Image (tube, rainbow, N blue to C red):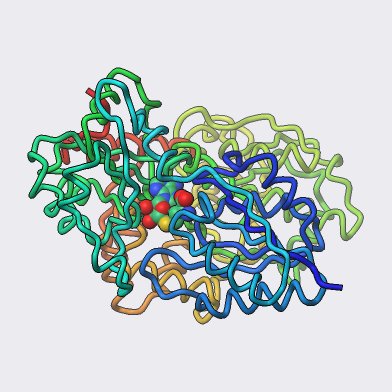
Amino acid sequence: MSGRVVLVGAGPGDADLITLRGAEALSAADAVLYDELVARELLDLAPPDAVRIDVGKRGHDAPTRSQEETCALLVKLAREGRNVVRLKGGDPFVFGRGAEEAGACAEAGIPCEVVPGVTSALAAPALAGIPVTDRRHSASFAVVTGHKDPTRVSRELRWDALADSVDTLVVLMGMRNLEAILEEIGRVRPPETPAAAVMWAGTKRQRVVEAPLGELAARAREAGLGNPATVVVGDVVRLRAELGAPPERPLAARRILVTRGEEQGARFAELLEQAGAESVHVPMLRFEPEAEPLELDACLGRLATYDGLVLASANAARFLAHRAHEIGVDLGELRGLVICVGPASAAAARKVGLRVDRTPEGRRDAEGLIEELARWIEPARKRLLVPRSQIGRERLPDGLREAGAEVDAPVAYRTLPPERDAPEAEALRARLIARTIDVATFTSPSAVRNCLGLLDPESREALSRCVVAAVGPTTAAALREAGLEPDVMPQMAGGPELVEALVAHEARRRADANEGGEPG
Ligand code: SAH
């Protein structure tokens, strides 16, 4: 029994711009073939056991699969009896090569259905506050490809004729040849014609640059706009000021490297994305329990004798609890104070069932903690337990000792670098060299060292051209030691604080570039 193929338009941008019919088709799919620009959350709508195949291609970049291969794969999967959804960005028949895929199915005698989607040609202008038609300004619009395709129809595209006869021009795939395209249009339309480019429409990363036709190319480049973006030319762009498009997010479309470990990094990346950034998460640290935790075990054995447990990281809390559990020690035996260096370690401590007695109010680093604890430690030589990683700095235990404490600092976990030939490491080097990372964030000295350990001279050089951000002074020092001057550092060390500092830095950068991002 033969299956069938449904060509589904996913809409542009975020997942919720798909149609109800498209969502329904996905929920009944045995196989989903999807493109690069399709929102990944949509894949969750398919049943868990459906196969999901990335056949993505994006703009001019080398396709992962040729169009012929994609067509052949559709036919093959359907012949195996599967219900195949071909999920395409926007509408399947607007520059999506959907017709070729439907044609391949027809030729193979496979039933094929189309579920239209919201096309970015109309949605991108709309989401930027630009209606493509308006009684006062535009009675017609044309959607044109800016891709220099070698086919005849594309070679014979007449920009001057179009620009002369159509009120609103919408250009898709136009970023690569933007200068040439706008120049062609400029032969017919005056340079002061209102125009705009809308990047990542329908997502938190959406960015808009509005400028007169004659300046749009330069302004869009200056602002760092690239694919995917839709360009609109015509008097309707004026309406943007009246309609009040939603404001751009403060880090919209900035591509930000997150080097923090798995879990904390994910939270940090989420904050960045809320601010509109695209996060590129490459954890520079792996954590493992210490293999032979003899010292830790001994400390856990005398847990009741400590006046205080000092937790300098979430991992310290986590791995301490992990080992205690393994050897049957109840953390409840601890009678001393639990002191955490910051909110992350405090949250982790609470999660493993410890009550948190203190977190320093001021600086959240070793020095801040030592300063705050010094008066408490002094009169009666307190006994402190300070679990740490094998590469943990001695500054905290030593500083506490200098302040008069008796300190046990056993290794509770190991911090390991990522592997140099791991695919993520390779992808990171490639992205740095291709300049598709704007900002690199570092949240610990070891992340700095491990990151640099993954780079070759070329990607290392590329990193120094990114905006480099440090979470606090210790990390900043490690960056300087490696010859990288941090551009951004928050007043107080911390993930949310770093995001705020990045937002402020970006606002200054945009003000300097003086781009016309806001209407009016
Ligand atoms: N079938 C798609 C278009 C595919 S061509 C549709 O109907 O939307 C790919 C082009 O679409 C990109 O080069 C860009 O010009 C445009 N595009 C796709 N997603 C976009 C988005 N989120 N914001 C702005 N333009 C987008």
Against 411, residue 500 (above or below) is above
Residue nearest the viewer, comparing 60 with 132: 132
User: Does residue 79 sit above or below 329 in this rendering?
Assistant: below
Q: Please state, as top left, top right, bottom left or bottom right, where the N terminus lies in the image.
A: bottom right
Q: Residue furthest top?
A: 242
Q: Quadrant of residue 457?
A: bottom left
Residue name at image x 71 percent, y 38 percent:
307
- Depth check: give the residue in front, 333 or 86: 86
Question: Where is residue 55, by image quadrant?
Answer: bottom right
- The answer to whether one can see residue 446 in this image is yes
x then y, percent, for residue 12: 50, 46
Identify the residue shown where x is 34% and y is 57%. 173
Q: Horizontal and vertical percent for residue 27? A: 77, 50
Q: Which quadrant: the C terminus?
A: top left
Between 308 and 184, the residue placed more toward the observer is 184
Direction from residue 276 to residue 153 in the image, left or right = left
Picture quarter containing residue 84?
bottom right
Q: Is residue 498 left or right of residue 342?
A: left
Quick check: can you spot residue 279?
no
